[in-house]
Amino acid sequence: MQIKNEAMLITYADSLGKNLGELKQILDTHFKGTVGGVHLLPFFPSTGDRGFAPSDYTVVDSAFGDWADVESLGEEYYLMFDFMINHISRESVFFQDFKKNHEASPYKEMFIRIHNFFPEGRPNKEDIDLIYKRKDKAPFQLVEFHDGSKEEVWNTFGEEQIDLDVTKEIVKEFIFNTLKDMSFHGCSVVRLDAFAYAIKKLDTTDFFVEPEIWELLDEVRQEAAKYNMELLPEIHEHYSIQMKIAKNNYFVYDFALPMLTLFSLYSGKSVRLANWLKMSPMKQFTTLDTHDGIGVVDARDLLTDEELHYTSEELYKVGANVKKVYSSANYNNLDIYQINSTYYSALGNDDSSYLLARAIQIFAPGIPQIYYVGLLAGENDIELLEATKEGRNINRHYYTRAEVDEEVKRPVVQNLLALLIFRNTSPAFDLEGKIDVTTPTESEIIISRTSQDGKVTAALTANLATKEFLIVENEKRVMKH
């Protein structure tokens, strides 16, 4: 199924109901017309990081269901799958064979062997300091082989996630086979997780290394195009990198919008948000919340350092049950540039603020993605957080079918679903259409979207200080809050 210009749900296979079958039932019962697509967070067998350390892309984790369940979803919703192009589980058949057979393994070239990557006598301290790291140490892991020898391999993320050498033909073959398999099972968009780390090159930061990163993306895009699949490169960094990717006609994420919207609603000021909406690309997926934390670095220079600091501090003051320690090493936080909270709780569990935030999102350029907890205006799950000591679990509540049945009755959720249905059905949100943004006063913003043929215009008029807003379509009222 081709991408539809309709909102996309982000969910784990076992978070809205206990498996893929229950997810389908919940969608069919409560969310018809609300979402047109589903980003199924990793549903493959995995040995860590809530699915992001896949050991085998050819099967569905049996705890969630099987390929028939995935394909059933794909008959009604366009689907996004994750492809961890940078790494694979150390329990994969490829890495296990490498450990067992070492130099005799047919898969030995799949991994980045540190003694081969660096010249003799290196890496030195300067080499390690230069690397863009997600850890406070060198991104290497010492491996002990069955023959008793030891050597280090590249390991950017968790201990289970061993980096792949994407320059080698055997890895390219693996990538291409995986893309083909994903298309066969109904994938419309491939989310390239952690792709910016995929190219390693001597004497660089090993992060978004140009021009090689473009060569890799183009190769993957050409292969995906054979199966009518789009790519969505995933990267949390300065917004200028997203703009570069957009200029090369890829879909991108609007990861700046979450912090900009929080700043606007906390401060009551409209100009920063307006400036961003005017410059944002239309070929993008917008977010307020994802399975990770709320990204801070993504809005740098769109907000000043002072404004970013203000927004972060206000989040801890205004937010419901949001504590700095939840985004620290004490709670296994991997990324110091993210704050762990649901978006609803970041706004103090306030219905008016939350609905306005979602109204801004649906009027922003692009296709809105809404995380499953956000779809139900979910509060921070402190119980799950403390039980697991995993910071990101504050925003990863497991909803039973019975819970969903109750949550959808709340007025804030009913209004949100109405907003999304309007976004999915109004021609004003044509991705080939126009957007106009004005700020009549310091606290007011008017966002207008007009269809390509000019026949339909929808407008959001909002007061960021009072949280009041009005939505009209061709001057007919749609919602007032």
Image (spheres, helix red, strand yellow):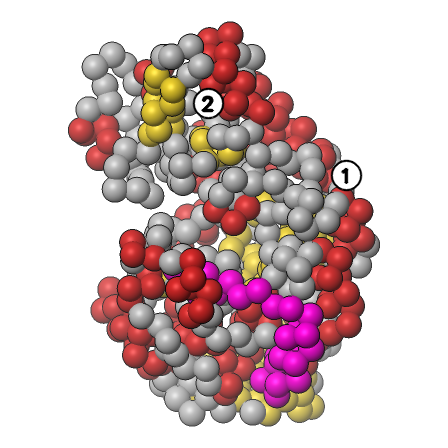
Residue 408 image point, x, y percent? 66, 80
Residue 74, image x, y percentages? 77, 53
Q: Is residue 439 above or below residue 45?
A: below
User: Magenta part of the protein: which range?
Assistant: 391-416
Kindly identify the residue that appears in the image at 69 percent across and 44 percent down. 62
Q: Quadrant of the C terminus?
A: bottom right
The mark tally for this picture is 2
* Disc with the residue nearer the chain's start (1 vs 2): 2
Q: Is residue 234 above or below residue 227?
A: below
Q: Nearer the viewer, residue 472 or 285?
A: 285
Q: Residue at x 38, y 58 (%)?
A: 389
The kind of secondary structure the magenta stretch mainly shows is: helix
Residue to which mark 1 is pinned: 184
Q: Residue at x 58, y 25 (%)?
A: 93
Q: Disc 2 marks which amino acid?
A: Phe
Above or below for 94 versus 294 = above
Identity of the residue furthest to the front in this view = 387
x 73%, y 49%: residue: 65
Specify the label residue 111 is tagged with: 2
Residue sitting nearer the eye, 346 or 260: 346
